[in-house]
Image (cartoon, coloured by chain):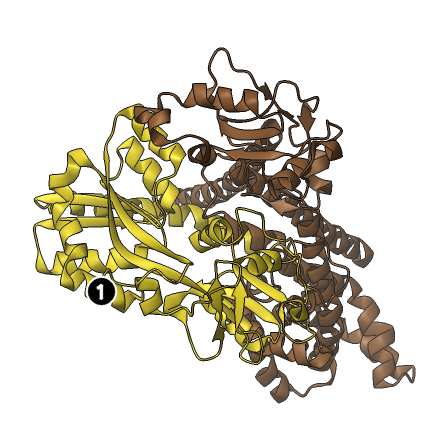
Chain colours: A yellow, B brown
Amino acid sequence: MKTSKLFLILPLIGMLSCGKAKTDDKGTEGSSAAVSVTIKGSDTVLPLAQKEAEELMKTNADVSVTVVGGGSGVGITAMIDGTTDIAMASRDLKTEEKMKFADKKVEIEEVIIAYDALTVIVNPANKVSKLTREQLEKIFTGQIKNWKEVGGDDAKIVAYSRESSSGTYEFFKDEVMDKKNYATDILNLPATGAIVQAVGQTKGAIGYIGLAYETKEVKQLAISYDQGKTFVEPSVASAKDKSYPISRPLFYMFNKVNAAKVKTIVDYALSAEGQKIVSEVGYIPLN
Amino acid sequence: MKTNFKQIKEKVIESILMLSSAATSITVILIVFFLFIEGAGVFTKKPIDKGFLLAVNESNPVGKLEPSQIKDIFDQKITNWKELGGKDEPIVLFRTGDITDYYTEEELGENFVNFPDKINELMAKTPGIIAFFSDKYVNKEFKGKEVDINKITVYKFLSGEEWFPTAEPVAQMGVKPLIYGTLWVSLGAILLALPIALAAAIYLSEIAKKRTRNLLKPLIELLAGIPSVVYGFFGLVVIVPLIQSLFGLPVGETALAGSVVLAIMALPTIITISEDAMRNTPRAMKEASLALGASHWQTIYKVVIPYSASGITAGAILGIGRAIGETMAVLMVTGNAAVIPHSFLAPIRTIPATIAAELGEAPNGGLHYEALFALGCILFIITFGINMLVELVTNRNSHKKH
């Protein structure tokens, strides 16, 4: 009974949403501003781009910006196909993608608009306060299973990761785990907030989050990328001077042919106001 | 004239009713059809990204690899061809991006024009290589040998034990842990919910005074109206730490946590349906039992429960149905580790949670996307079976009555 009722409602919802979509289209067409720009790509950059677009449109009525997520790969593919003006990306172009652009004889301009850093977090009761990249790799691929193997108490390691849909998941895998796959018994949580919550209440837990999310309920680890010679504490300062290794630049990329069209948006992102939004959203400004 | 108008009005109402029921049925059939068409696609493709290939040196005797072997190679768990029946040669991994480790940008030429030649050269001079790259860069005098990868069969899909749908170069599509996880959580939920729900239903229909009943029933029904994400959050913040400290576990996100949350969610369904069934017991039967000298409790378990057994079963099965399809609450409390569970105190991953978490990222029409639809098909078959069971049970009941 319940399901059949639901199915009755479904087409109705469909119709309603169709109707709505149509009016939306008309709206944008009617108010077509002097410049209308689409930004598409990384979900990491999305909140930043969205906020900047809103602020920009408030002050400048001539610009209309549409921001769409989907992931860095999606944005770059869309730029190859010419369906977006700006691609936002949380990583540099891959060799494969450079080849695709070379095939199409398209020249791409990449602009770094902010930095993002990942911090590795553990429960505050954990004695361990630093790990090397190799140890992290072994923990997340399941080779190290007990904290005493890395200098902690005799307790099982419970590793938390984001879901595979997250750009952070891919970034951690590529950057820290040498592109190896996560162990099957890693716990996957749907949101960064859930990871903070879980690590805060689980004694043997380890997880990774964006620097912007740091709270007092969890302890951040210092990381070494040179087999344990130097350990660097994660902080906005160490991410800015690039001494903290697990950080990444966030990009706006666009076709050089379109440079004039997207200039307002890129300039705004790099302006003092734009960089202030970067800090507000929780990323690391350029300077 | 007036009757004529009335007739027309009735005709119009009738046709509107008919149309809406037809639309409903067609929608249901279309959705199922769509689900199965999309899901079937996973069995027609190789588990490697379209347009890419895996190649080895020409002299390498290994020509066919299982997806799981390829994953182990790229995870550096298998490091020598000897382990795969080849020569005693260490395996050299190569992904397209690694080309810059071997050749400078100048050597590759402007716009990578020399890439096909260079990769050919590299393949020829490295006997232990296994390379993963786009088939666009295979030129005519290509010296390597393409590795044959088996398609995913239905059997492999159902019995595979690893779920890495986004692994490169080859996706691992084994849904056994997900099916097990779904069934375990639902089974646990029903084991927890059924006794409590039965007790509550008996109390409400037979023992409680009218005033208590009028107070309690809406409260229980209110449970059904709470959004599942709220249950999930409640589970994550309250039940997970509770289970962790109660059993002294390293981690609280377990199948048991999922079962407890789902049991709470299934309670109103089971209570409402079984209570209705109990209250349908004819007054004459109960009075006859009491007149024969049976006590109140004897009447309940000798007359009321047997009479309403099919209603109780239907309620229980619908409760399981709700538990199996539940997404958000489970996603938040079970830990989502795709391993085959051996205990209720270990993390598991369910089918609905997997679909919800991954569909957003799966590219439309790709292998991962189709695999998620195939998961939807499995879920559909399970719940369809359960609904058939309800139908069967309630039909048997109506036969008995007449």
Say above or below: B142 vs A85.
Answer: above
Residue B129 x %, y %:
59, 29
Task: Judge by depth and name the residue closer to the eye, A102 or A128.
Answer: A128
Quarter the C terminus of chain B occupies: bottom right
Q: Residue at x 74, y 81 (%)?
A: B206
Say above or below: B27 vs B230.
Answer: above
Q: Is residue B196 left or right of residue B24?
A: right
Task: Judge by depth and name the residue closer to the eye, A285 or B212.
Answer: A285
Task: Judge by depth and name the residue closer to the eye, B275 or A129.
Answer: A129
Q: Residue at x 87, y 81 (%)?
A: B298
Circle 1 crowding by C-alpha within 10 Å: few under 14, some 14–19, many from 20: some
Task: Return the residue found at the far top.
Answer: B140
Residue A111 x %, y %:
23, 47
Q: Amino acid at mark 1?
A: Ile
Quarter the N terminus of chain B occupies: top left
Q: Is residue A118 left or right of residue A200?
A: left
The residue at which mark 1 appears reads as A277
